[in-house]
Image: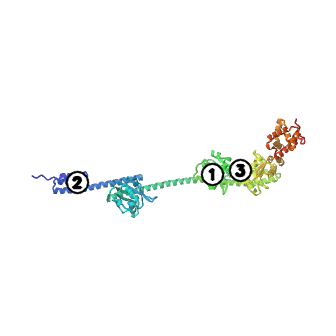
Amino acid sequence: MREPAPSLAPHLRRLLDLLDRDAPAEDFGALLAAARGEGLRPPALDTLEGAAQTALRIRRTLHQHRRREAELSALFDTAGDLAALRELDAVLRSIVRRARTLLGTDTAYLTLPDEAAGDTYMRVTDGSVSPVFQNLRLELGEGLGGLVAQTARPYATADYPTDSRFRHTSNIDNGVSEEGLVAILGVPLLLGSDAAEGGKVIGVLFAADRSPRSFSPEEVALLGSLAAHAAIAIDTAHAIENARRALAELAEANAVIREHSAAMQRAEEAHDRLSDLVLGGGDIADVAAAVASLFRGPITIHDPEGRTLAAVGGTGGGAYRGAAAAPFATRAAEESRAAGRAVYRDGRWVCAVLAGAQLLGSLVLHERAELSDPDRRLFERAGVVTALLLLLRRSVAETENRVRGELVADLLAAPDRDPDGLVARGHRLGLDLTRPLLVLAAEAPAESRARLAAAAPQYLFGGEGIGAEHGQRVVLLLPYEGTEPGTAARAAAADLSHRLGVPVTVAGAGPAAGPPELAVAHAEAVRCLRALHILGRTGEGACAAELGFLGVLLGDSHDVDGFVRAALGALLAYDRRRGTELVRTLGAYFASGGSLTRTKDVLHVHVNTVVQRLDRIGALLGKDWNSPERALELQLALRLHQLAEGSPDSPPAAES
């Protein structure tokens, strides 16, 4: 009895099970071999073989669908990354990692051009183990990447070291060898449809294996899709960066415009405010106060010699007033004039106050470390307004001085002609001729007389005095405020000599009040001036009282008692206190021609007594008492004292 033929059904069930488990293709062949071994007859075997072929086709279709699904998922995720606007490097790393995963390669990488260096560089790598490869730089047109970039088309090689379609270089070949790569696929990162239609290659995406491999068209297309996303990511990032940069520039420009507009408005307001001050008759202090208010800092204004004309504000203004400010103010003003704008020196902003090339002074802003360009220009504009005000004041002062000069000429030429009229004219010019005044007569070398006449108003600038050229000299009338005429004369001589650069000699007299007395004081000052030249004291200042016996001879007051007290006062006082005869001893000494022997005979004392008295006289009068000039003054004072005592010819009394 024959055994029944094997049934086809179990084999079909096992075939479906293999398909369900997605078993390898060789398991399907093993199933057919087992069926043959079990004696499955040809009709059934043919059916089973056909079913196996159909199952394999279904399996391949499912694999393709799964792969396509994975590719679409990867592309969708990449598109999501782009939509989320992630950071560019993160998006590129994700794309390279997905390329390596989907194509199943050992590594993937992306290169971008470096426009500054003129080559390309590795931007992102995934699966790379060689630092040499990761830092590889490629010249344009070199290697497989250079071919892809030049043609804007994908290229693949199954064996890179032996492929001759592209230019090999030792640099690239060493890097590829270090990484151990053999099969490489590269696709362009293309902006636009393609290169022929104006697309631009902005990089290359690679997938590579360390063993020989042929890349299918589907794999090339997949890598191309990922490259397209990478190109979009790069272009989007550039667009966003450009937009951010443009927004930042717009914001900066807007801020500059707002700042400029505010500065223009401040400048207009400041200009109007300062102009109103000038036109309204404001003075230097008003300008200083306005500038201090504008800049919220202390302000000082100085003349060309550095003297403070006005100071407004806190500690900074007060710390730089007076003589201490002069060296800094003059030096910084010259630096500002040379620079043509305000300068920052020693913690202060300084602007030269100029009228053309002439330096009128300086404007100093304290306690401000920085000034913006608009504020700096505003500060310089304040300097211009200050210059205008100083010029106006100087012009008015010079005009007034010319009118006052006419008054001085009439006062000195004919003081008795119309005294009341002279006093009235003085009142109209702001000078009270009935109050005590000092009279100064100044004289310079002939070639500098015109300059001296021009310098006199500048010396008086800002004060109440007047000055005018009279004869060959310049006469100054100054209000008497306790300063002695000799002191005032020396101060004027020093200042005017400095201004002119030549010696200016000044003689002082007074104080005097009223036209007649002022004319007399002027005459005394002129005589004193002549005496200064005779004594060789050109370029100095003094008054008649300071010239000793010459002052007695030259002065109109003839203050004999004052001269005697000045010369012999120490001896007279000593004699009164001690009951001694130092004054008589000194008279006998001079009368004896300086002979100790004759002096002791006249006084009837021992010679040692004479020596002791003369030592005491030297201690009281000074070591130079016996010098020719002092001796002359002392002898004149002794003679005047004897005349005043009523016994000019009586010899000194003998001392027991």
Q: Secondary structure at mark 1?
A: strand
Q: Secondary structure at mark 3?
A: loop
Q: In front here: 511 or 538?
A: 538
Task: Identify which amino acid the numbered label 2 is placed on.
Answer: Phe
Mark 2: give few (<14), some (14-19) or many (20+) Cα within 10 Å. some
Q: In front here: 577 or 314?
A: 577
Q: Secondary structure at mark 2?
A: helix
Task: Identify which amino acid the numbered label 1 is placed on.
Answer: Val
Can you give x and y, in whole percent of width and height, for residue 236 in the image? 42, 56
Q: Which mark is residue 350?
A: 1
Q: Determine if residue 14 is in view.
A: yes
* Residue picked out by circle 3: 462
Question: Exactly how many numbered labels are in the figure?
Answer: 3
Mark 1: give few (<14), some (14-19) or many (20+) Cα within 10 Å. many
* Residue picked out by circle 2: 28
Q: CA distance from mark 3 to mark 1?
A: 22 Å
Can you give x and y, in whole percent of width and height, for residue 417 in the image? 83, 52
Q: Are marks 3 and 1 in contact (CB under 8 Å)?
A: no
Q: Is residue 654 left or right of residue 170?
A: right
State the image quarter where residue 214 is shown.
Answer: bottom left
Quarter of the image for the C terminus: give it.
Answer: top right
Task: Identify which amino acid the numbered label 3 is placed on.
Answer: Gly
**Which label sits in the foreground, 2 or 3?**
2
Q: Earlier in the sequence, mark 3 or mark 1?
A: 1
Can you give x and y, in whole percent of width and height, for residue 444 in the image? 76, 54
Q: Is residue 545 left or right of residue 152?
A: right
Q: CA distance from mark 1 to mark 2?
A: 99 Å
Can you give x and y, in whole percent of width and height, for residue 241 in the image? 45, 55
Q: Earlier in the sequence, mark 1 or mark 2?
A: 2
Q: CA distance from mark 2 to mark 3?
A: 120 Å
Q: Determine if residue 82 is in view.
A: no
